Amino acid sequence: MSKALGYAAQSAQSPLAPFSFQRREPGPQDVSIEILYCGVCHSDLHTVRNEWKSTTYPALPGHEIIGRVTAVGGEVTRFKKGDLAAVGCMVDSCRDCPSCKQGLEQYCEAGFTGTYNSPDPEIGAMTYGGYSDHIVVDQYFVLRVPENLDLKATAPLLCAGITTYSPLRHWNAGKGQKVGIIGLGGLGHMGVKLAHAMGAHVTLFTTSPGKQEDARRLGADEVVISSNQMAMAKVLNSFDLIIDTVSAQHDINAYMALLKLDATLVMVGGVPDPLPMQTFSVIFKRRHFAGSLIGGIPETQEMLDFCAKHNIVSDVEVIPIQKINEAYERMLRSDVKYRFVI
Ligand code: NAP
Ligand code: ZN
Ligand code: ZN
């Protein structure tokens, strides 16, 4: 075991505070990584405050990790000491079920091991994430970091990037397609950049009028302020695909009405409470309401390589870990451009 330091919450009501714990010694297949940067995802906040009713305390989040390899186990072939390395939302899965065999570890039938707040069979406790100084991960779940990308701005690709890339790819976003992205936060701003790079016509839906300029700079062809009913009415029945990244309660029916015949709205936002949907939202125009969870390991590497090729990273504000509780409050007010990175 090796001593690790991080920031954890002891209950749903307590702030994140310094916390020391043990990491396992690297086994034959393990890579030990000194963490340089870790992005701050809204899922971290949902988890710390037990909004999904599934948190075990202490909770130590963080699943957008960029670091440098400090040691490798005897059977590790893909990394050596000194390499850059990244870790996203998963650190293990069964690797044997039909989903794992297709590289869709996020849909592992036995349940994947999350980077935090998952039972860790290796140490018999819960996993602790990237708000910490180092992490030990099986080499299969460690990603290669392209050399040309700014490291701090690359961290958010590991969750915000792959979570939007995967549905855009699965539903074939590209030239000639009208894609809508709802919410310009961590996920949303990556969705805008990625959909634009894939060649789609991109419309950003936002509740924040002040984000219009940024949205266009990030790659949106159009911006619609969702409270403006005239603007919403103008784009009824016109989208091939909509990705909804909103983290809180909102009127899903208003967005379903924007889909064309047979088109799909993909929910990626983890809204804690049910979203009431009218049956006619899907009956008319035979529309689909779908969901999507992060992305598998092969697709995460593909996304990093796509970003390297198109020179895409996240727009970040770097904070010292001591400011994490303040950052959570700002994230709740949509006051971040567009991802905090520790
Ligand atoms: P974020 O940075 O806080 O962005 C969320 C955005 O949603 C905000 O910037 C805001 O955009 C909009 N929004 C917030 N509250 C709203 C409200 N009450 N009504 C309408 N719009 C609202 O969060 P994030 O890190 O991108 O994460 C977004 C959600 O995705 C979270 O629930 C997170 O847990 C989930 N998530 C899911 C997956 C997955 O695999 N499916 C992976 C990662 C995260 P505007 O200011 O532009 O309106
Ligand atoms: Zn995340
Ligand atoms: Zn599996």
Image (cartoon, rainbow, N blue to C red):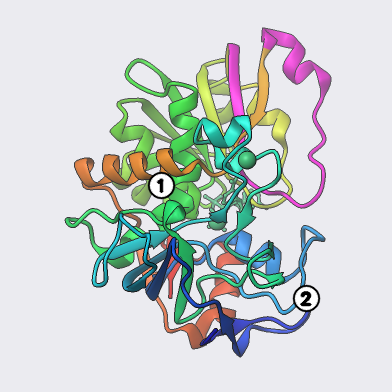
Residue type, mark 2 in image: Ala
Q: Is residue 217 above or below residue 137?
A: above
What residue would you read off at disc 1? 190
Which callout, 1 or 2, points at the residue further toward the start of the chain? Answer: 2
Residue 227, visible in the rendered structure: no
> Does the magenta-highlighted stretch encompass residue 226?
no
Magenta region: 262-286
Quadrant, the C terminus: bottom left
Residue displayed at 43% across by 84% down: 320
Relative side of 267 to 29, left or right: right
Judging from the image, what secondary structure is the residue with disc 2 in?
Answer: loop
Q: Nearer the viewer, residue 338 or 211?
A: 338
Q: Nearer the viewer, mark 1 or mark 2?
A: 2
Instruction: Tell me the kind of residue under disc 1.
Output: Met
What residue is pinned by disc 2? 12
Mark 1 residue crowding within 10 angstroms, few (<14) / some (14–19) / many (20+): many
For the residue pair 72 and 298, the one nearer the viewer reads as 72
Quarter of the picture holding the N terminus: bottom right
Image position of 64 (left or right of 50): left
Disc 1 from disc 2: Cα separation: 29 Å
Q: Which mark is residue 292?
A: none
Q: Position of residue 51 (x, y in %)?
A: 77, 62
